Each structure stands twice: as C-alpha cells, then as structure tokens.
Amino acid sequence: MYDVPTIWIVIALLGGMFLTMYLGRRLGKSRPPRDDGETGQVTATQASLLGILGLLLGFTFSVALGRHDARSAAVVAEANAIGTAWLRTEYLEDADSVKPALLAYAAERVAASTVPVTEKEKRDNLIASAEEAFANLWAIASEITRENSSPATVAFSNSLNDVIDELSARDAAIDRHVPEIVLIMLYATFLLSGGLLGYASGAGRTRITATALMMPVLIVALVFVIIDLDRPRRGLITVDQSPMNAVLDVMRKGGQT
C-alpha cells in the first residue's frame, strides 16, 4: 500500500464509499418497511460504527503525526551531530585531511534526503555511498588518534560516533509507518459505515441528504492527510530538510555552525 500513490488510494476509498452507500440503499429498499424496533437497532449500530470510525481516525492521525514529528527531529539531530563534528575539526592538528572527508559525507546525506523513498534502489545506493564516505572519514580519524591521542582527538571521535548513530536513527525513522493492518481496519470501517448509511436510507424510504454525502468527503480528506503525513518524501506534507542544507552550506563556505 505504501508504494501506491496517495491520490489513487483516496479516489478508490471515496468511490468505494459511494458504491457501498448505493448497494446498501438498494438492499434497504428491497426489504419491507421496518418497524420501530428495527429502526432503533439500525440507528444504534450506525452510531456505534461512526464512533469506532472516529476512534480509528483519531488514533491513526496521532500515530502518523507522531512519526512525522520524529522524522523532523531526526533531521535536526543529524544536522547537529554533523555540525558538532565539523566544529571539533578545528581542534585537530591535521584538520585539512578530515574536513574534506566530513564534507563529502554530509553531501551524501543531503543528496539522500532528496530521493523519494519509493526509489528504493537509488536511495539504498546513496545510503551505501554515505556509509563508504563515513568509513573513509573514520579511517582518517583513527589514524590521527593513533598518532596523537589527545582530548581533542577523543572528542572528535566521540562526535563521529554520534554522526553514525544519527544516520541509523534517521533512516529507521523514515522506514517506520502506520501499520497497514490499522489502515485496513480504518478503510473497512469506513466502507461499512457507508453501506449502513445507505441501508438506513433505503429501508426508511428517504433520500440521502447532502449533509450525509459531505461526511465521506470530509473523512476521505482526513485520510489523505494521514497517508500524506506517513510518507515523508512524497505528497504535500514533507519533512523539512533545511537543517541539513544549512549545515552543508556552512561547511562548504568553511565557516562555523
């Protein structure tokens, strides 16, 4: 489901909602007029389904928003880690050999942030390139530390540990999504609500009002936002990459973060 464009999911969901409303109305009209007891039962079931739907929507939106915030925080954390490592190169005697390697690593990470996660092969290649750049950086830092073990080199090595930790944390945050079973339950409840709404209208020999038709449109709009939040590098809502871009710009200028 994650690889399917959001707009197609929304169109299918809205179409499915109207289809179940139509089929439910046809089924309701085919039955004899209901008595008050059946009316109360249908009304209670309809209210219960709408309550479950509201609960699922609230839960799913909360999960999607929380993971979006976690991805945003991961970008800031990685930018801070790289910026700290860059600052600590100033204390090294052989800073000129370290800075180009650190700059190359930062450039690879910024390049990876521009690739949609659906382009898995390209993204994996950029992640592999970043890890290779870090391995080169670590080899240089290790050589410097062996030649001159000092508080400055130890502090720089610690900052590099933070850099690689944040790489893993950020990539893991990108790959965490709302579980598909939750989305499937949400969609199923949504379709059942539409079918029951149509059934109640048909059995009661009443027309579906414009207000009732607006409900599925509003719910689908909320579902669109949920799915968009859950896809960090595609759609309308994306994770802000400006912290990483700002750090890379400063590094290229040779200044300080």
Image (cartoon, grey):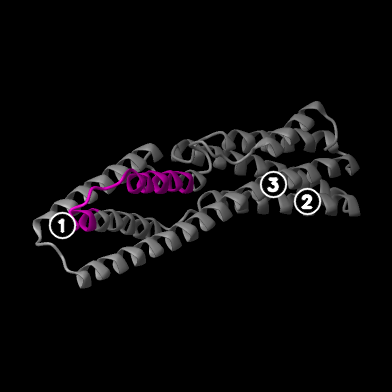
User: Residues under labels 2 and 3: Cα distance?
Assistant: 11 Å
The span shown in magenta is 198-226
> Residue at label 3?
78
Q: Is residue 139 visible?
A: no
User: Which tag is nearer the camera, tag 3 or tag 1?
Assistant: 1
* Mark 1 burial class by Cα count in 10 Å: few <14, some 14-19, many 20+: many
The residue closer to the viewer here, 193 or 116, is 193
Question: Disc number at residue 16?
Answer: none
Q: Quadrant of the C terminus?
A: top right
* Mark 2 burial class by Cα count in 10 Å: few <14, some 14-19, many 20+: many
Question: What is the three-letter code of the residue carrying label 2?
Answer: Ser
SS label for mark 3: helix
Q: Earlier in the sequence, mark 2 or mark 3?
A: 3
Q: Are marks 3 and 1 in contact (CB under 8 Å)?
A: no
Q: Earlier in the sequence, mark 3 or mark 1?
A: 1
* Mark 3 burial class by Cα count in 10 Å: few <14, some 14-19, many 20+: many
Q: Position of residue 168 (x, y in %)?
A: 61, 52
Q: Position of residue 17 (x, y in %)?
A: 28, 48
Q: Is residue 106 left or right of residue 127?
A: right
Q: Is residue 40 left or right of residue 130?
A: left
The residue closer to the viewer here, 247 or 100, is 247
Q: Is residue 217 magenta?
A: yes
> Residue at label 2?
159
Question: What is the three-letter code of the residue carrying label 3?
Answer: Glu
Residue name at image x 75 percent, y 47 percent: 81
Q: Position of residue 200 (x, y in %)?
A: 23, 58
> Residue at label 1?
28
Q: Earlier in the sequence, mark 2 or mark 1?
A: 1
Question: What is the three-letter code of the residue carrying label 1?
Answer: Gly
- In the picture as drawn, the residue positioned furthest to the front comes out as 36
